[in-house]
Image (spheres, grey):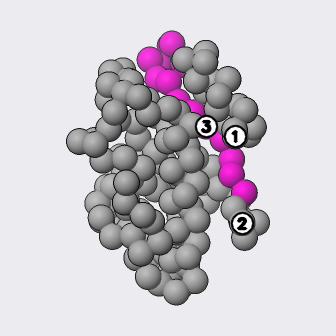
Amino acid sequence: MAQERSFLRSEFSSFDLYDTAVRGRTYAHGSWISNTNRHYTLRVYFPSGYPDECPSTYITWPSPLLGWRGLRSIESYGTNSSMHVWQTDRPGWTKVCTFRPESWSSHVSVNKVVRKGTLWIAAYECHLDDGSPISNFLVEG
């Protein structure tokens, strides 16, 4: 994990990797400023079986994260493939799909998970502009 921390900091200077032995949780956390100058906070939780198990990625700020025209929260969509979100297990945080568990590989780096979280944010901001599903702005793969 020390190597992962070093790579993460080199690409995303506002992110760090935390290992809380007391709670048995390892996570990456940091802030991201989008191309539209909006501030977001992301957190990626790594399960005890990492790197063989897929981590969970959350947008923790702003909270709640609102959808098009601010009519409802993204969290209220539950698991929704066109919006690339999962039903959240942390109220107020939006759980985004960066990887499907069945397509997860132990070779995926922390950087790639964070990068996909920031790509989700870029697609989310496009959704805010015209209401189209987030899937319209992401390329599968």
Name which residue lies at 69% across and 38% down: 11
Q: CA distance from mark 3 to mark 1?
A: 10 Å
Local crowd size for mark 2, using a 10 Å CA cut-off: few (<14), some (14–19), many (≥20)? few
Q: CA distance from mark 3 to mark 2?
A: 20 Å
The residue that disc 1 covers is 12
- Given the image, on which type of amino acid does mark 1 rest? Phe
Q: Secondary structure at mark 2?
A: loop
Name which residue lies at 32% across and 25% down: 52
Q: Which mark is residue 125?
A: none
- Given the image, on which type of amino acid does mark 2 rest? Asn
- Asked whether 25 falls inside the magenta stretch, the response is yes
Q: Nearer the viewer, residue 49 or 8?
A: 8
Residue 84: where, in percent of width, then height? 37, 61
Name which residue lies at 58% across and 24% down: 4
- Mark 3 touching mark 1, by CB under 8 A? no
Local crowd size for mark 1, using a 10 Å CA cut-off: few (<14), some (14–19), many (≥20)? some
Looking at the image, residue 134 sits to the left or right of residue 119; the answer is left
Mark sitting earlier along the chain (1/2): 1
- The main secondary structure of the magenta stretch is strand
Q: Residue furthest left?
A: 102
The residue that disc 2 covers is 35
- Mark 3 touching mark 2, by CB under 8 A? no
- Asked whether 125 falls inside the magenta stretch, the response is no
Quadrant location, the C terminus: bottom left
